Image (tube, grey):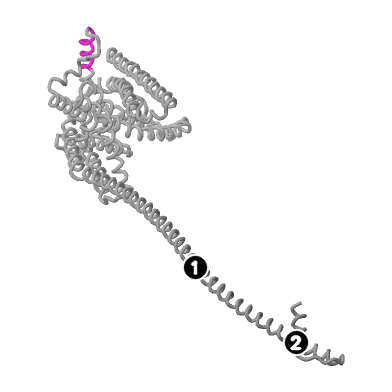
């Protein structure tokens, strides 16, 4: 079982009988040498190329995400501001419209009042004129009634066979009419 | 050994043959410069690392491709680990820790390819890793804190009469660290591969005897299950080696616990 | 010859005894995992931050099992 292990590393079966390959001291320098070469290679590859690149990519991504979030926040603020401005404009427009409406109402009211006043004046004038004319007509009618009454009275007196002078009849009729 | 008792066509148990270090070209003794299967599989490991971490991250895309995701996952995993365990001042040793992690992981995973060779199953390799970490961290602690680093062994919280005893225990456990650190990795990997080989040796029993009808499917099932376990072990051992390195690094950066 | 055979027998006995250590380490690893799981189920929010501690504990427990395995291997193949 305790065959010498050192010279037979090449031949598989002999070495397998000889014991664990892990304890074959003859292969240690070889493994350690290649291990150091490998470790240095990996270290150089990682520290010179891979890690800065990946770190840069990750930092870049983080930066982009932060910037995007900030931009989104800014846009949100802008949208809020725009909404506020819109609401303010709307309120202004409303109050402006109310003012215009009030002014228009006042204008219309003034015009209306003026028109009513002028119409009233016209109506008053027309009414006065009409009253004058009615008085005139009434006076005319009175005179006509007197004339008719005098004529009728004279005729009646003539028909009854009396004679009366015109002035007596006229005085009598006038007295009756007044009576 | 069961294999020797069988006849020429019997079962062959050589579970440790897979760990042989052989020259890649021709026969002969293994010199320190000889190109062996160790060289081959370590070179393949370097290639795998390059493929993932250099070509994978080539795009530098904001929305990563698959290979880039893997590279970033590995980067973030080790980076977070070292930051969590050692704090901010440990981050400057990140490339060294990353090198260890990536080498162990690549060599463990490549070793799971059937017929391959696993450098991390060799105590010579893991001892260099473990003692390298041990020496580097001890020197780092002594340079950073001078003799104050030795205060790590002198527990200020303990009762005075217990302190020398605790100091002895602490010193012994400190010097056992690299041994357990390296043997844990090599032992885990070696044990798993040897168990796989033992089950694999049972698999051709159906060609030899009637028991094979039962034994062969069982052994194939066992190989599958152990293989899955070994994939897990390959990753966990790389993780454990790295996180223990971080823990030791924390001791060197902040001796005395905090 | 007798002595050599006895020595070989002793090696295998020793290796078998050493392998018991692996089983005992398995008990330890299971104990750690079980306690972690029990604690994690009680307080799931704290579980994530303690995974590293879990693995460190598992590694320490398992290392001793690996030592036993190593002793077995050394007895079988190297002694």
Residue A165 image position (x, y, % from top left): 78, 91
Q: Main secondary structure of the magenta part?
A: helix
- Which residue in the structure is indicated by mark 2? A170
Crowding at mark 2 (Cα within 10 Å: few <14, some 14-19, many 20+):
some
Q: Quadrant of residue B206?
A: top left
| Point 34% across, 49% down: residue | A73
- Which residue in the structure is indicated by mark 1? A110
Q: Is residue B53 above or below residue A114?
A: above
- Give the chain letter at badge 2: A
In the image: residue A72, left or right of residue A118: left
Q: Is residue A77 above or below residue A25?
A: below
Crowding at mark 1 (Cα within 10 Å: few <14, some 14-19, many 20+):
few
| Point 20% across, 29% down: residue | B133
Element on which disc 1 rests = helix
Q: In this picture, which residue range is highlighted in magenta?
A: B161-172
- Give the chain letter at badge 1: A
In terms of depth relative to the viewer, which is nearer, A110 or B80? A110
In primary-sequence order, the first of circles 1 and 2 is 1
In terms of depth relative to the viewer, which is nearer, A174 or C52? A174
């Amino acid at each position: 079982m305790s065959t010498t292990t050192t010279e037979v590393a090449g031949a598989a079966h002999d070495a397998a009988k000889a014991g664990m390959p892990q304890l074959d001291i003859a292969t240690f320098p070889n493994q350690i040498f290649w291990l150091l070469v490998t470790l240095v290679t990996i270290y150089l590859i990682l520290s010179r190329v891979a890690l800065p690149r990946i770190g840069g990519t990750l930092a870049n991504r983080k930066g982009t995400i932060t910037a995007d979030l900030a931009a989104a926040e800014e846009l949100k603020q802008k949208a809020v501001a725009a909404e506020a401005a819109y609401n303010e404009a709307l309120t202004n427009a409303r109050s402006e419209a109310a003012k215009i409406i009030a002014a228009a109402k006042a204008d219309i009211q003034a015009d209306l009042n003026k028109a009513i006043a002028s119409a009233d004046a016209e109506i008053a004038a027309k009414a006065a004129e009409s009253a004058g004319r009615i008085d005139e007509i009434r006076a005319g009618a009175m005179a006509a009634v007197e004339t008719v009454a005098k004529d009728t009275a004279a005729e009646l007196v003539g028909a009854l066979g009396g004679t009366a002078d015109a002035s007596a009849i006229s005085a009598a009729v006038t007295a009756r009419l007044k009576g | 050994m069961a294999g020797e008792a069988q006849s020429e066509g019997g079962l062959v148990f050589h579970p440790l043959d897979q760990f042989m270090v052989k020259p890649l070209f021709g026969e002969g003794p293994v010199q320190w410069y000889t190109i062996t299967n160790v060289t081959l599989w370590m070179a393949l490991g370097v290639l795998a690392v390059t493929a993932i971490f250099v070509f994978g991250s080539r795009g530098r895309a904001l929305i990563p491709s698959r290979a880039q995701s893997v590279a970033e996952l590995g980067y973030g995993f080790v980076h977070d680990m070292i930051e969590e365990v050692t704090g901010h001042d440990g981050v400057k040793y990140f490339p060294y820790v990353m090198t260890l992690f990536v080498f162990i992981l690549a060599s463990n995973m490549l070793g799971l390819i059937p017929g391959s060779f696993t450098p991390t199953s060799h105590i010579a390799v893991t001892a260099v890793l473990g003692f390298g970490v041990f020496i580097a961290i001890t020197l780092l602690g002594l340079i950073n804190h001078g003799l104050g680093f030795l205060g790590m062994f002198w527990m200020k919280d303990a009762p005075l009469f217990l302190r020398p005893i605790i100091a002895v225990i602490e010193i012994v456990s400190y010097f056992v660290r690299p041994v357990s650190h390296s043997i844990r990795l090599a032992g885990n990997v070696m044990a798993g591969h040897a168990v796989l080989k033992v089950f694999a040796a049972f698999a051709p029993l159906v060609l030899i005897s009637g028991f094979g009808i039962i034994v062969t499917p069982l052994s194939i099932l066992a190989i599958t299950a152990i293989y899955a376990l070994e994939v897990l072990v390959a990753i966990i051992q790389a993780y454990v080696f790295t996180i223990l390195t971080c823990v030791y690094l924390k001791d060197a950066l902040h001796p005395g616990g905090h | 010859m007798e002595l050599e055979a006895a020595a070989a027998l002793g090696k295998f006995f020793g290796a078998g005894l050493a392998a018991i250590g692996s089983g005992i380490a398995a008990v330890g690893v299971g104990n750690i995992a079980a306690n972690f799981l029990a604690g994690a189920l009680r307080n799931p929010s704290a579980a994530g931050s303690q995974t590293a501690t879990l693995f460190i504990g598992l590694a320490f427990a398992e290392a001793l099992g690996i030592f036993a395995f190593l002793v077995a291997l050394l007895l079988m193949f190297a002694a």
